[in-house]
Image: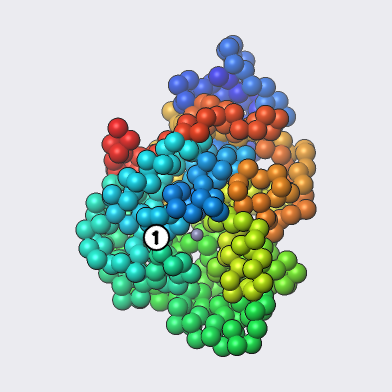
Amino acid sequence: MVIRDGLVAIKGEDEFKKISIIIEDGKIKELTDTIPLDDEIIDAEGLYVLPGGIDAHVHFNTPGFEIREDFYHGSCFAASGGITTVIDMPCTSLPPVTSLANLKTKLEVVKQQSVIDYLFYGGVNGKDLSDFRIKMKELAPYVAGFKCYLKSGMESFGSVTYAELREILLMSSELGLPILLHAEDEAYIVAAESEQRKLGSGVDNYYYSRPEAAEIIAVSRAAIMAEETGGDLHIVHISTGEAAEIAVKHGVSVETCPHYLAFCLEDFRKQGSVLKVAPVIKRHEQENLWSQVADDTISFVTSDHAASRIQDKNTGSIWSDYGGISGSGLLLPYLFSEGYMTQRISIKRLLEIVCENPAKRYGIANIKGRIAEGYDADLVLIDPHQEQMISGADFLSKGRMTPFEGKEFKCKIIKTIRRGEIVYDFNKGITSEAGSGKMLRVQGGRNELLD
Ligand SMILES: [Zn+2]
């Protein structure tokens, strides 16, 4: 396959380069100025060619919560937005990925469904800490890191205390894998929520049950403990600029999500539960967070894709409405449109926050995340001259509600290519088989699970 004459985004460069890409056996064989001959030539004249995006935080729910989302629909939606690799969370499947046996159970189902490549996180479930060190050790060769919560909203996956987090961080330094932390302070939220529940069941009640302080307190404590233990800590979905600053000061990495970059409390009031998510959308943090994305305080951006049915978002009370946003297919288009096209970030920085940095953080930077010889031929062809109106009804995800409904993005995803195979085409939809995606091997890890 040859991708001819596209404007190619190259790692570390601020200008696109008009060049052709020769692909062989799923890998990038050569970047060339001469026009090559091939049986399959894709004319990319006038299109931008970027590395396929890496969404390092999704909840695709398989197996167990397929009523909201499954790996097939989630991966198709991601592919439609230029994502070629996802890393799936351990907590929203049954059984949760807290042991090697449970990971195998999950993989058996996922490998028949995914159209893009994937990795898994292991998890440490505060509700069942029996033998957690042994379980982390047996999972370590196969996972990208371990997720845990200081405040969980799930029945099947519980929070850990600060003391337990310290033990988990010590294991992290022994295993050399990151701990991904949902950092909101449980004591703060339990007390504030019990007060707010007496006052009402609206958006403001939910906001005041877990405002900025709840995140800043948790991030501060966890970051201090990471420094003290030598544990490798990563804060997922940061929503407050001050918390991000504190984390980075202590050597802790952070990610944020499009919904925190795009919306504030006032939008939450207008839109209601479609914007319900944890951590809550904050009072006014968007420009803070955007400047931290630009200056590398925030190292990458993820979707935290968590789809739900429409009725789950409309139960009549903010307290019982589902918290989560269906977003994997919008991650790259959003960042391209509202980051690069509006000149908040350079193309070099865009590649870092949605390709290179997640690849590096999770041990796949040797094969994924850049357009260079020898790398997997994961590519996305983007038309920057067309606008696209966002409509949840068009989503390939099972979750078709979006806070971006009706917004115009300044780009259109034309094709997504995964290891040299076209997975998504704007005119044809998904063009790859369920199960064509594969589980990746983390550098230094193993993947004989696939044999
Ligand atoms: Zn999440």
Horizontal and vertical percent position of residue 52:
55, 38
For label 1, the SS is strand
Q: Which residue is located at x 29 percent, y 54 percent?
A: 99
Identify which residue is drawn at 36% across, 72% down: 160
Q: Residue at image x 46%, y 64%?
A: 235
Depicted 424 relative to depicted 250: above or below = above
| Observer-nearest of 321 and 120 | 321
Residue 267 drawn above or below residue 10: below
Q: Measured along the vertical axis of the image, is residue 205 above or below residue 248?
A: below
Snapshot quadrant of residue 7: top right
**Of the pair 81 and 205, the residue shown nearer to us:** 205
Give the residue displayed 78% in from the left and 42% down from the top. 387
Q: Quadrant of the N terminus?
A: top right
Q: Quadrant of the C terminus?
A: top left
Residue on which the image places disc 1: 147
Q: How many numbered markers are drawn? A: 1
Nearer to us in this view, 317 or 228 = 317
Q: Given the image, on which type of amino acid does mark 1 rest? A: Lys
Residue 107 visible? yes
x and y percent of residue 76 in the render?
Answer: 57, 40
Residue 190 coordinates in the image, percent (x, y): 48, 82
Give the quadrant of residue 80: top right
**What is the quadrant of residue 268 in the picture?**
bottom right
Note whether residue 283 is visible: no
Mark 1 CB near ligand 1 (8 Å cut)? no
